[in-house]
Structure formats: C-alpha cells, structure tokens
Image (spheres, rainbow, N blue to C red):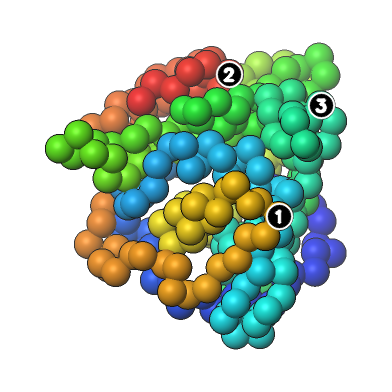
Amino acid sequence: MSQSKKLIVPKSRDFGWELKPITSTYFKVLRNRSNQICVVLEHSLLRGVTTEMIYWWFKHFTKLQVKLIDIPGYEGQKVPGYLLWHPSDHVSAELKGKLGTEGTARAGAKIHIKEVMQYKKYQLKYPVDQELSIFYHERDGWGMGKKVPFIGPMMSLRISYKDVYEDNKIIGVHYHYEVVAGSHKQNIFAKKITQKIVGNFDTEFWEAWLTHNTIEVGVFENFLPALFEQRHDINNLTYSKKMNTITESAASQSGHNKALFEERVKGYSESRDAFQYQGVTKKSFL
C-alpha cells in the first residue's frame, strides 16, 4: 500500500510459535457495482484472548517496549511491542496528532505504519509506509484509513471483535476484518486518484496481505495474554517462550462464522458505496 521501497526490516524473530495458515480463515476480494475493491476476512477464533486485551493493545501498542528473554538473536534486548505482532514483516508504528492520555491511541489521531507484506517470500516487493487517520477506536473495534480532499474516503480498514462465551466463560474472540479501497464516485478526477492509489493491488498483493494478516492476528494468542497480565507495570514488560500458553495446534481451525462472512460478501457485492456499507465509524455489527 505504498510506493516506498527504502524500509529497513529488522531481522526475523523466532518465538517458537505455530503461525496460523490461511486455511484458518474465510477470505474474499471482490469489486462492487462502483468498481471499488472490497475485502472480507473472517478469522478463526482467537483462543485465550479477550476483547479487553485487544482494546488495550490497540490503545498502547505503538508505545510499548518489551524485553525479550530467550528469543534467538534478541536475548535480553528491549524491542518495540510492534515486533511481537509479526515475527518477520513489521518495522515500526508511530502515533501522531490528537492523542489520548500519555500518548495513547484514540479516534482522531494518525498512525504511521511501516511494514512489508510476506517479507520472507517477496522481500520488499510489497512495502507499506503509510500515515493513516484513526477513524474508530472503541471496545468493539478499530478503524483507520485515508480521505482525499474533494473526493472523500479512499481507503478504509475496519476491524470488529467480540468475546465468545462457552458455559458463561470467555473462550476467545471473534475477529473480523474488512477493507475498502477506491472511490465510488464516477467522475474522471475520482477515477484517476483511485487508479493511482489502488492500481497496484493485484491478486498476488492480496495473497501476500492475507498471509501477513492471518499471521499477525493469529499470534495475538501467543503473546497478548502475557503482556496484558503485566499491564500495571507497562514500562517493564517482558516476554519469554514459556509465557505462551497455547498448546493445541491451529491447523484444523477455520473462519469463525461462515454465514456472517457470506452475508458480508453479498452486501459488498451489491453495494454502490462500499464505505457506507462498511460503516467504519459505526459500532460493530457483530
């Protein structure tokens, strides 16, 4: 989602985690009636995670520093928390603008993200070096994107999440991701801007994005509960392999709610303004 190819990617981190495969998701990229790109990604259940943890993470993650105890090549080093969120693709994330208490994230702020899509396979072919506006940050979701003067929304990424219960106990989180790119407006100026911003989003890019996002979301299971337990001593966070409590393989997992996935795909395919259907600033539909 960027033209920049000057990113310096940190050496990969071997956390010993099983990374979730793309077969653990339901995924679709389509064009709606206005030729906007619409992406629907239904993740598998995030085991052992709660929405309270995810809300805390989005609020603080750009400021977190974590001491890695026994990660090869990083023993005893403090690294940005962002590097735990993906073992090979993440570079940096920085908040700007109207921030919350102690520099935390909030709607109205901006976030500058640097990362690459599926670095181990494509190296720097698909870099991301983007400043995005945070449109939504509540306990049920996160939304960010770009607006273009005189045109309006041009890109919007919306995450929704909800606790899943079994026997009155939270067993995990339902995590659902949607992306809209391109204007629904049909004038020549809008079409040219759309082509410039999203013209390189081909099939291979979305395959790389899917793999990246499946891993990124899946590893919440491995590290987030451990960091959240230390939230009251946020300046002295540590992580070691023994803190990962996941013991069951994710290989047999699939997207959490297939009916919802199919409903959202149909809604986008029939839409004329995908941003309106997405509702990036509205409460989650989950």
Numbered circle sitting on residue 118 = none
Q: How many neighbours does mark 3 have within 10 angstroms: few (below 14), some (14-19), or many (20 or more)?
A: few
Q: Is residue 48 left or right of residue 1?
A: left
Residue 18 percent across, percent down from the top left: 39, 71
Going from N to C along the chain, the mark reached first, 1 or 3, is: 3
- Please tell me which residue is depicted at 23% across the width and 39% down the height of the picture: 169
Residue 127 percent across, percent down from the top left: 71, 58
Q: Which residue is mark 3?
A: 98
Going from N to C along the chain, the mark reached first, 2 or 1, is: 1
Q: How many marks?
A: 3
- Please tell me which residue is depicted at 35% across the width and 41% down the height of the picture: 173
Residue 183 percent across, percent down from the top left: 65, 23
Numbered circle sitting on residue 235 = 1
Q: Nearer the viewer, residue 201 or 170?
A: 170
Q: Helix, strand or loop at disc 2?
A: loop
> Between marks 1 and 3, how big is the CA–CA gap?
22 Å
> Between marks 2 and 3, how big is the CA–CA gap?
17 Å
- What amino acid does circle 1 point to? Asn
Q: Helix, strand or loop at disc 1?
A: helix
Q: Which residue is mark 2?
A: 281
Disc 1 versus disc 3: nearer the observer: 1
- Please tell me which residue is depicted at 56% across the width and 40% down the height of the picture: 56
Residue 125 lies, with reference to residue 269, above or below; the image says below
